[in-house]
Amino acid sequence: MKERSSFSGRVGFVLAAAGSAVGLGNIWRFPYLAAKYGGGIFLLVYLVLVLTFGHSIMTMEIAIGRKTKLSAIAAYRSLHKGAGFLGVLASLVPIIILPYYCVIGGWVFKYLFSYLTGQQAAMAQDSFFPNFISSAHPIVWLSLFVIVTFLVVMMGVKNGIEKANKLMMPLLVLLTIAVAVYSVTLPGAWEGFLYYITPNFKNFSVTTILAAMGQMFYSMSLAMGIMITYGSYLKKEDDIEKSVHQISFFDTGIAFLAGAMVVPAVFAFSGGDQSKLNAGAGLMFQTLPKVFEAMGMARVIGIVFFLLVLFAALTSSISLMETVISFVEDRLHWHRKPACCLVGAYALVFAIPSALGYGPLSGVAPLGMSLLDFFDFISNSVLMPVVALLSCLLVGYVLKPKVIIDEVTLSSRFRSQRLFTAVIRYIAPVLIVFILITSVLSAMGILLI
Ligand code: PHE
């Protein structure tokens, strides 16, 4: 068998995994969920889930990858003959996410372009975003995003992007901190900041856990085989647990800052109108232009900010596209170039309905959701929990947690070994089954929660 290439070291691994993890999930998705699902209580549930579930599942996936030295589908099959279907199920997740991820990536492109052409005053108006997404223009921008992702993957200049990202990511953190500090000090924003960080149990419901759990899988790039693939490149002497802590610290830190940038500003600009918190997917795009305008130099800040976000989004979309391509290569035995073209064309075509779901196709509303929300719901709130549940059952009962523990302890002590076993065997399965049943029933309108 061909020797598998490895990362140059643990740092390279952490950066690559963080590149996949940190993306639109942190900057676009986290703030609107936090705003919608109760602020501080969402934040608290999210943190608890990351520290328990997130850490355990990420450790499990990386260890499976390093142990088997295979990517998702083959890795599951090699662990257990009957588990191959789990790999297939996991591969469905990036197939569903990729197209609509490109739609949001396209929105970022549009915003970058609008700042470049000096439209900052118009962008700060309430009507700018709704006018944009209800038109057919998003198709142009998502195409641009797909094409850029495709070219990077096809021409193999991924490393260049990842190198650039090493510079862009720290800059993004600095700019996000600056904007967050400014946002919190806007008149009227403090109340919003308190809403964001103080858990209020009145706002708690099963949907809070469901939304936080879906967000955790999405943001940490879990339950879709990606971390298995990354783990397969890791060397036997590299500390898995430490890597997991670093990746999740980075991922959660950026999400927290993005929330601090967006949520308080919603209060400031609406005069404390809480209903504005329900804006959903467009929240960041509607709020930030106003913050930038209030900061002065909106054009410069807007250009720099959306450029940085674009880079973070690209490293994630590249990792999504790569995963789908490797699926086509492995399963259909296609060569790389045609596989790239197939996946690129797929992303382009299947993104279009999601892009039009806020305008021409707004009449198509499965489960009462816009098309983009629907795909997002199916992947994050249904498929990912199912994949995570089955992986936990496989490792917890069929293979036994010892398989993972032995792999982790090859390179270091496994400090949270007990927590890991408890999460994989008991906590995760029970919670996921409960959440899945309630969420599906409520989405079908059978149960009101
Ligand atoms: N984790 C990425 C983000 O937060 C999204 C992503 C999901 C990337 C799945 C790869 C795979 O934006």
Image: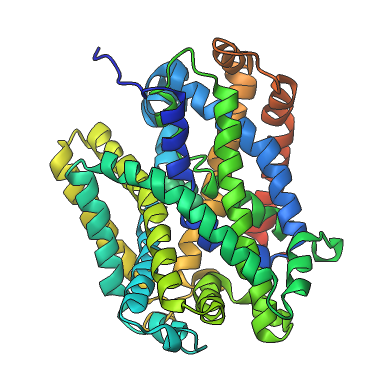
Residue 376, percent across and down?
A: 49, 59
Residue at 43% in and 16% down = 235
Q: Position of residue 18 (x, y in %)?
A: 48, 40
- Spot occupied by residue 237 in the image (x, y as percentages of width and height): 48, 12
Residue located 23% across and 52% down the image: 150
The relative height of residue 224 versus residue 404 in the rendered view (above or below) is below
Say whether residue 205 is visible: no
Tell me the colour scheme of the image. rainbow
Total numbered labels? 0
What is the residue that sits farthest to the front in this orientation? Answer: 297
Residue nearer the viewer, 113 or 31: 113
Quadrant hosting residue 364 = bottom left
The image quadrant of residue 414 is top right
The image quadrant of residue 37 is bottom right
- Give whichever of 156, 433 is nearer the camera: 156
Location of residue 169 with respect to 328 vertically, above or below? below
